[in-house]
Amino acid sequence: MKDDQLPPGRRALLRGAAVAGLAATTGCVGAERAGAPGRTATPAAGPGALRARKPSAYRLRPMTGPGPRRAAPARPAVRRAPILRLPGRARAMVLTFDDGPDPRYTPAILRTLRRYDARAMFFVCGEMAAESPDLLRQMADDGHVIGNHTWSHPLLPSLGRAAIHEQMERTCEVVERTVGTPPLWFRAPYGAWNRAAFHLGAELGMEPLAWTVDTLDWRTPGTGTIVQRVLNGAGPGVVVLSHDAGGDRTQSVHALDTYLPELLDAGFHLTVPSRYRV
């Protein structure tokens, strides 16, 4: 039966239902475009609309309401030289340990630091970290800073840019996978920096840190000599280089037991830098 053949009351009822249905449909579309909680906006139709989106956009994600947007962390500036000392830190020093973690020596160093409630930085090699993830977790749990010391400790200037990037990135990945956050600091093996290391480190969100005092403990000069080098070089903002792997580090372990309480008795605070600006 056509509309003009319906009784007037029936025609009015049908027209009202149609208007209500149109209003409801328009309201749903408007809510999706406005990003209503718990709903997903319908992508625009038309040729090429799906191709314009990246494949990762189609991965399943938890269905949650909209939350506050967090800005991405700022990438550190590309430096031309590594940081050697932390300025503006009166009576504060930084102890750093390279090449680990090593289950023969790192646990003893962690125990000593824990005994005196001191913090340190550990510049780890990725291949060592991958073999001892529990030691990385202990470092993070105790409040120490984990830095990137490449994957296998190569001489960076002898490598191409792609190889340097792989050395850095693989170590970033194993650290983040183990402790939940990527390293924010980087140290070149042997202190051999080049332009690619500075650029790639910045791209991966890391600052380059060298040292002020080198204990030369890798030469095993004797526990007493290591202690004297640390105490003689002590000062505000000083960064001390030692090792917890890469050879016999028994002297390094014993030296820490001696110079750490002496530094504390002299009024120094053994601390770690916070993020980037130093």
Image (cartoon, helix red, strand yellow):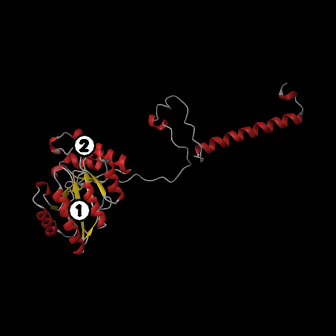
Q: Can the viewer see residue 278?
A: no
At a point 27% along the width and 56% down the height, the residue shown is: 107
Farthest top residue in view: 1
What type is the residue that disc 2 sits on?
Gln
Q: Can the viewer see residue 107?
A: yes
Given residues 254 and 71, the one toward you in this image is 254
Q: Is residue 8 above or below residue 181?
A: above
| 248 sits to left or right of 203 | left
Given residues 198 and 265, the one toward you in this image is 265
At a point 68% along the width and 39% down the height, the residue shown is: 25
Q: Answer whether labels 2 and 1 touch (C-beta < 8 Å).
A: no
How many neighbours does mark 2 have within 10 angstroms: few (below 14), some (14-19), or many (20 or more)? many
Which residue in the protein does label 2 denote?
Answer: 167
Image coordinates for residue 252, horizontal then vertical, percent: 18, 59
Image coordinates for residue 204, horizontal then vertical, percent: 31, 47
Q: Quadrant of the C terminus?
A: bottom left
At a point 29% along the width and 44% down the height, the residue shown is: 131
SS of the residue under disc 2: helix
Q: Quadrant of the N terminus?
A: top right
Which residue in the protein does label 1 denote?
Answer: 95
